[in-house]
């Protein structure tokens, strides 16, 4: 996979790997996220590893200007939700 691309699995884990609680400072205000949804255009790189495994890489669009051969952009929509029902 080209070094410009990042494994799709690592990208998805980073999206969902943040703490659901934001804040809790001296004022006692905090926000608890119960889910996240991200939609973004991406470029994909689909290749095979040395062992034959499928490798999917992703990156934000690299070419903001029109070129003679424009790359194909895909839309990635990612949704993650908490399994906990009490908001903690």
Image: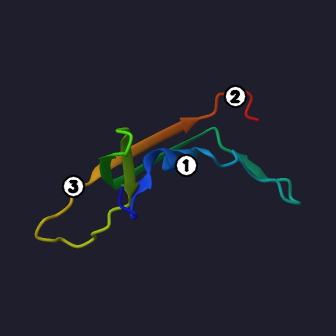
Residue 61 falls in which quadrant of the image? bottom left
Q: CA distance from mark 3 to mark 1?
A: 23 Å
User: Mark 1 highlights which residue?
Assistant: 15
Q: CA distance from mark 3 to mark 2?
A: 38 Å
Is 20 left, or right, of 24 in this rendering?
left
Image quarter in which the N terminus is found: bottom left
Q: Position of residue 84 (x, y in %)?
A: 70, 28
**How would you rate the neighbour count of disc 3 (Cα within 10 Å): few for under 14, some for 14-19, many for 20 or more?**
few
Of label 3 and label 1, which has the lower sequence position? 1
Image quarter in which the C terminus is found: top right
Q: Nearer the viewer, mark 1 or mark 2?
A: 1
Which residue occupies the foreground of this view, 87 or 11?
11
Is 68 left, or right, of 60 in this rendering?
left
Q: Position of residue 86 (x, y in %)?
A: 74, 28
Say if mark 3 contacts mark 1, CB within 8 Å.
no
Q: Residue at x 77, y 51 (%)?
A: 30
Question: Which dot marks residue 84?
Answer: 2
**How would you rate the neighbour count of disc 2 (Cα within 10 Å): few for under 14, some for 14-19, many for 20 or more?**
few
At numbered mark 1, what does the secondary structure look like: helix, strand or loop?
A: helix
Q: Position of residue 31 (x, y in %)?
A: 72, 48
Q: In the image, is residue 11 above or below residue 67?
A: above
Is 16 left, or right, of 72 in this rendering?
right
Q: Residue at x 57, y 50 (%)?
A: 14
Q: CA distance from mark 1 to mark 2?
A: 18 Å
Residue 23 falls in which quadrant of the image? bottom right
Q: Position of residue 22 (x, y in %)?
A: 73, 52
Question: Which dot marks residue 72?
Answer: 3
At numbered mark 3, what does the secondary structure look like: helix, strand or loop?
A: loop
């Amino acid at each position: 996979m080209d070094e410009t691309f990042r494994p799709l699995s690592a990208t998805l884990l980073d999206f969902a790997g943040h703490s659901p609680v934001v804040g809790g400072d001296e004022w006692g205000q905090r926000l608890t996220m119960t889910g996240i949804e991200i939609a973004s255009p991406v470029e994909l790189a689909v290749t095979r590893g040395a062992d034959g495994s499928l490798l999917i890489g992703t990156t934000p669009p690299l070419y903001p200007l029109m070129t003679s051969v424009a790359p194909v952009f895909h839309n990635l929509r990612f949704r993650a939700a908490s399994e906990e029902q009490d908001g903690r």
